[in-house]
Image (cartoon, rainbow, N blue to C red):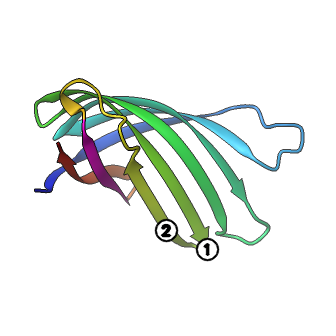
Amino acid sequence: MTAHAKGTFNVNLTREQDGPSKAVGRMIIDKKFSGDLEGTSEGQMLMASTAVQGSAGYVAIEKVTGRLKGKSGSFYLQHIGVMNRGVGELAVNVIPDSGTDELAGLKGKMNIIITDGAHSYEFDYTLD
């Protein structure tokens, strides 16, 4: 049975120095989750923009550590995002077999919502 979690998060992105070509940027992710998921995450993001305004892409991996509806452990999220002239598509999935402790067997997809600069999440998941 699929469970649903929701809440908010704060995110700090720290830009790392660009490589020699500056074609690809890198950022460090630091998040704090509140709500049904309480905890922190750290990760890295790679992104590239094009010459066309509003077109870009990014990939990221983050390790989340905390409590999901009272169960503690950690897991990894993988992000794949594309902006096509301002229209975005984003997939954020739990990496298979990455759950630890009480979150072992976690599978799921997270939806990130940004409204007026505030971040929230909806997380549909199963726990074996």
- Find numbered disc 1 in the image and state the secondary structure of the residue it sits on: strand
Q: Which residue is mark 1?
A: 84
Per the image, the residue denoted by label 2 is 89
The answer to whether the residues at label 1 and label 2 have Cβ atoms under 8 Å apart is yes
The residue closer to the viewer here, 19 or 120, is 19
Q: Position of residue 18 (x, y in %)?
A: 78, 37
Q: What is the chief secondary structure element of the magenta stretch? A: strand
- The residue sitting at 76% across, 47% down in the picture is 24
| Residue 116 left/right relative to 126 | right
State which region is magenta: 105-114
Q: Say which quarter of the image contains residue 40.
A: top left
User: Is residue 18 a member of the stretch shown in magenta?
Assistant: no
Residue sitting at 38 percent across and 58 percent down? 116
Residue 108 forms part of the magenta stretch? yes
Residue at image coords 35%, 50%: 119
Q: Quadrant of residue 38?
A: top left
